[in-house]
Image (cartoon, rainbow, N blue to C red):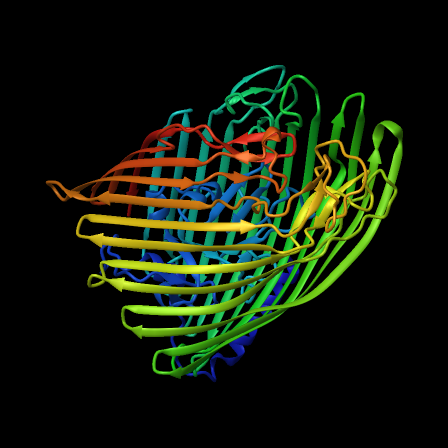
Amino acid sequence: MKTGFWLSMSVVAFFCATRAQAQEAAVDPDPAQAVSDNPSVPEDDVSKDIVVTAERRSTSLQRTSVAATVLTGDDLVKKSVNTVDQLQFASPSLTVNNAGQGNQFNIRGIGKGEVGSTVGVGVITYRDGVATFPGYFQSEPYYDIASVEVLRGPQGTFAGQNATGGAVFITEANPVLNEISGYALAQYGNYNDIKLQGAANLPVSDTLAVRIANNTQVRDSFYDASGSYYGDLGKLRSQSMRISMLWQPTSQLRVLLKGDYNNISTGGYPGSPATATSDPFTITNNAYNHSKDESGRIVLDATYTFAGGVQLRSISGYQRGTTQEDIDYDGSSAANYTFHDYVNERILSQEVNLVSPDTGPFTWVLGGYWQDDKYTFPEGGYLLTEPGIITLALQGENPHTTLAGFGQVGFELAQGLQIEAGARWTRSTSRNTATYTVVNYGISIPQDDFTADKKVTGKVALNWTIDADNFVYAFVATGHKAGGLNGVNLSFVTPQPFEPEEVTDYEIGWKATLLNGHLRTQLGGYYNDYRNFQVSIVDPDTPAITSVYNVPSSTKLYGVEFSAQGSFGGLAFDLAASVSNSKLGRFYAFDPRLAHSGVCDPETGPETATCLDLTGNRQSYAPRFTLSTGIQYAIALNDNMTLTPRVDYSHISSTWGTLFEQRALGDFLVARDIVNAQLTLDKGPWTIAAYSTNLTDQHYIAAINNLRRLAGAPRQYGVRVSRSF
């Protein structure tokens, strides 16, 4: 924490030293406020500009060469998007499979296919400019949010090496000077779901403001559980709070400090056997079930604008979390396999940007980034037990480091015609310092391995603003996800590292504003060449073990995405859809869940009853069709009241959970059809809403995690009351 803090303090000291020499210049508008606050424009008027901040400056979505979905805080409430799981029902080409402690977040079939700290994510999440825990601690709720930006396709220039599939940028609501404001919310629903939420903005002086926010939620279990389990199976207990301070002593200097804390318990992650055909909410566990994520984050964001309009920005981050999990590993009462996990993670990060003004034909951004991410498995923190067979323990550390420099330039070739080029150089390292113990045999196997790699990624785009209402673009972008180290194992063979993943993305798009500003559309097509997909298989060189291995041939993924937002008086709607396809290159492998014999070369096979030819199979978590749409109509009543019914529908077609496509082992995830509905009464500062999520009560499998299947949330309904001030 001290490292990141003092790095930012040094930048602030530099600001103060140069302030007397600089002339007055305006600081860029707060991107959070640019998205969410504009009292002169009706809330649902589509003419209100949608702002994208992911490229280190605030730009219009309709004038940025990126495939993205941007949701304001109001959108999140209207669409019932409260957590990362529900984000998949509001954005095309996206799947989020909650696998317990972590999730498998994929965009266009690229992201994370393995649950574990060994394999990095392919869709990185940023909160207030800081890259968050990669794939873990993802149950942090969305509350008091200004905007969520979902960027599709590799974001190698600005988001870095863990953005091969895309990136999510979350901007939390910031303090506002000279204004007392806020809101309070109370909600009650079925399963005794109680939520209390609120925020208060308090100006301390003309240059200092504080914002305090809180979210508390408790809920009973969704599950019909039997067996000799114990613990609060599936019960939610969530407490989150945030304090933010904004100091803006001059129009040139802006310093924002935020602290977030989360303590979230779900009573374990109940599951049933992956091969089961029963209702996924019928659980017969016979082991202790428990889970808790406790995490904190501090972000210091300082921006100074020089006389010529160039901005210097420093973003320092400190994050620490502890995740705990106890589960019935086989998901049944037939056996008594258990898994206990207690892991600490600490991340230090620092980013510095120089950003040119938006005026003139030439624009540029320069930046540097450093991150130190360390997992710690304390003694007794990792224990897998199969009674009468084996008991495995793990103790040690898994640190990762990242060092990067990046930049992007834009030049106007002719009126309305611009070329952009960006690149990022990254060096990443991974080390395993651990001891793997077979407790019941007294065998300990130490490991001290290290791997490092360097890579340059980037993007070249051609942008054409045809007129005020039409913008077209074409670009080539590349992404990179670092390789890593396999853990120690019982074979006494030194584990081999696996190689980085690479993706090359070709895209074209057209964004239009139609019908006198009442309709916005975004249409794009993409073709991805995806190489070295990291997958867990029987090791071809050491068939006695399972390890993470790279698919030797490239996967081709291609598709079309379309979205639209419309507003016509009281009528407002949005729509987003994607049609995509994927095809795995030549690849043979043993399925680690099945018995195997003989040889199985990943490139040549030969195909046998156990050496499976996976050539042409679909990429994991790559739906062929997604659709999300919502419609609402505001009905004016007497006494300045408005009644607004709203319905949202989302369809995610069936996907495969692994490349092996074994239906009998639970790999096939059926399509998800989710309907949400709300009826909202607004009168002045008061809002009362009746809501329902998953209105048809579809019971579906949200994820496959080793031997278990995990259910998505069932139907929930209730009443929500809020008051703004």
The residue most toward the left is 638
Residue at position x 75%, y 27% in the image: 385
Observer-nearest of 437 and 673 = 673
The residue most toward the top is 227
> Left or right: where does residue 146 sit relative to residue 482?
left
Q: Quadrant of the N terminus?
A: bottom right
Q: Residue 382 in the image: state x and y as whole percent.
A: 73, 36
Residue at position x 57%, y 57% in the image: 164
Observer-nearest of 142 and 415 = 415
Residue 694, located in which quarter of the rendered image?
top left
Q: Residue 361 in the image: state x and y as whole percent.
A: 40, 83
Q: Can see residue 366?
A: no
Residue 552, located in which quarter of the rendered image?
bottom right
Q: Residue 123 in the image: state x and y as whole percent.
A: 55, 53
Q: Can see residue 310?
A: yes
Q: How many numbered marks have been drawn onto this rendered protein structure?
A: 0
Q: Residue 68 in the image: state x and y as whole percent.
A: 42, 58
Observer-nearest of 35 and 582 = 582
Residue at position x 50%, y 58% in the image: 153
Residue at position x 72%, y 34% in the image: 609
